[in-house]
Amino acid sequence: MNFFELFDLAPSFDVDLSQLTTRYRELQRQYHPDQLQAQAQTQSNSDQALAQLQQSAKVNEAYDTLRIAAKRAAYLLELKKEAIALEQSIGDIDFLQNALEVREQLDEVDSPEDIESLRNEINQWIQALSNEFRIDYAEEDWAEARDTCRKLAFMQRILNDIDSAEDQFDDLEDF
């Protein structure tokens, strides 16, 4: 069963995130190891607990994969057996130059407002790249889809760094 089937979704880049989250919560209620009733530890209960733990971990992995555009794109390519060399470097010099400038901006932020502005910029990039991936995927232009997927992953890493920078600002404000 693939991740889309697990969540009763059609394999598609476009995912209704609220539906995904609702289904995730349902599955977690069903498979979370805490759902096992306290019973005497027998071998079958231990096996059942292990199976539930494994299923819960799979649900978490699937949710994390499907809710993040870059991971969802890579997973779709994987399902099509087209996830070849996604770890390769990005060859688009203009993209890399722009991304480097954004990284430098992140290093220079000195207020929560700057972070929010940068987050908005990155989210716009992710949206544009997501649109590009939809087209590449629909046209089965696998080379372009892989390139766009690499760019999405790069921008997602910047977004993660923005989240970390925001956490640091929050920690400083709390201090």
Image (spheres, rainbow, N blue to C red):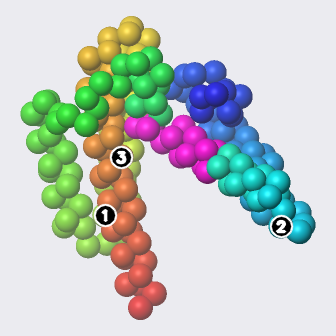
Instruction: Give the amino acid at mark 2.
Output: Gln
Decide if residue 52 is on the left or right side of residue 17: right
Number of numbered discs visible in the structure rendering: 3
User: Measured from the top left, where is residue 163 in percent x and y?
Assistant: 39, 62
User: Is residue 59 on the magenta stretch?
Assistant: yes
On residue 114, the disc is 1
Can residue 25 be seen here? The reply is no
Instruction: Give the label, 2 or 3, closer to the camera.
Output: 2
Can residue 70 be seen here? The reply is yes
Give the CA distance from mark 1 to mark 3.
Answer: 18 Å
Decide if residue 150 is on the left or right side of residue 18: left
Decide if residue 17 is on the left or right side of residue 161: right
User: Measured from the top left, where is residue 25 in percent x and y?
Assistant: 73, 49
Instruction: Give the label, 2 or 1, closer to the camera.
Output: 2
Q: Is disc 2 placed on a helix, strand or loop?
A: loop
Instruction: Give the amino acid at mark 1.
Output: Asp
N-terminal-most mark, 2 or 3: 2
Q: In which quarter of the image is the N terminus?
A: top right
The residue under the point 71% across, 49% down is: 51
- Which stretch appears magenta? 57-71
- In the rendered image, which residue does mark 2 sit on? 41
- In the rendered image, which residue does mark 3 sit on? 156
> Is the C-beta separation of discs 2 and 1 under 8 Å?
no
On residue 139, the disc is none
The residue under the point 55% across, 46% down is: 61
The residue under the point 80% across, 58% down is: 43
Instruction: Give the amino acid at mark 3.
Output: Gln
**Predominant secondary structure, magenta span:** helix
Rate crowding at label 3 as few (under 14), some (14 to 19) or many (20 or more) other CA atoms within 10 Å.
Answer: many
Q: Is disc 3 placed on a helix, strand or loop?
A: helix
User: Measured from the top left, where is residue 110 in percent x and y?
Assistant: 26, 73
Rate crowding at label 1 as few (under 14), some (14 to 19) or many (20 or more) other CA atoms within 10 Å.
Answer: some
